[in-house]
Image (spheres, rainbow, N blue to C red):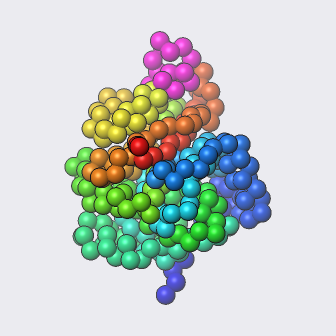
Amino acid sequence: MEKIRRASHAGSWYTDNPKRLAEELEGWLRAAGLEKSPDVRGVIAPHAGYSYSGRAAAFAFGNIDPTNISRIFLLGPSHHYYTPKCALSTATVYKTPIGDLPIDLEVIEELKATGKFELMDLRIDEAEHSMEMHLPYLAKVFEGHPVKVVPILVGAVNPENEAMYGRLLAKYVDDPSNFFSVSSDFCHWGTRFNYTHYDKKHGDIYKSIEALDKMGMDIIETGDPNAFKRYLIEYDNTICGRHPISVFLHMLMNSSAKIKIKFLRYEQSSQCKSTRDSSVSYASAVAKVDA
């Protein structure tokens, strides 16, 4: 029986007009001017409204060569629903205005059988935007290529369980027909986010935010989940996809494939210059086979 997850944020976070959406995505992908590579096995990309982060996200999704990929694992943080675990979708299809993405029910069953995952109902699934904001880009890039998705909502997972999920999912990294789309924004700065870390040695506030984010990005590029954990403990940077990123780092560490993460784009929603200002940072990366 078909169980549909609607494109619940279409018409607000991005346009629900299929023609306009396709044109926007094509425009951003073209502007990024990237060469598609079969060595790109994953991305880290933002999940804000497209008017904020659509352009930055193209620097992740524009690298994808869809030819040999048949399955996409989505790893997104949970913004509204608390769980200390990872949760699997109970939908059978994810809708987007420009094409639908069927869920890989076989892999969902496989993961369910481990006993380590909980299930999220459709209401939780549709309320969450972190994975949905990747779907139109994926639908566009994989147009004409049959592909299934495995959505995994990553809850407030403790470090031991991040490592456990990383080990459990590592075998899927070994299969080159699998792709990984990891959803995260970077620093949420300002009193409305209860985060106002400012190191004056960098000059303006926005430069301090950039230095902090870039430090985190550099650590993610080393592939060391423990160094990333130490960075988060020390600076408490408000990277909302910290758990999906950590799980992904553990997956790569436990995989036999040699895959390296590289950041290609960094943007901020606005430039903070006073404590009254606020901003969200967006960073796009590829996870590429290291020849």
* 258 or 158, nearer to the observer: 258
Residue 200: x %, y % from top left: 48, 14
- Would you place residue 48 above or below residue 262 in this image? below
Residue 284: x %, y % from top left: 53, 42
Assess whether residue 200 is covered by the magenta stretch: yes
Residue range (magenta): 196-211
Q: Quadrant of residue 231?
A: top left
Residue at screen point 47% across, 31% down = 213
- Would you place residue 99 above or below residue 15 in this image? below
Quadrant location of the C terminus in the rendered image: top left
- Would you place residue 127 above or below residue 228 in this image? below
* 261 or 160, nearer to the observer: 261
Most extreme residue toward the bottom is: 1
One can see residue 218 in this view? yes
Residue at screen point 56% across, 56% down = 65
Q: Position of 139 compared to 195: left or right?
A: right
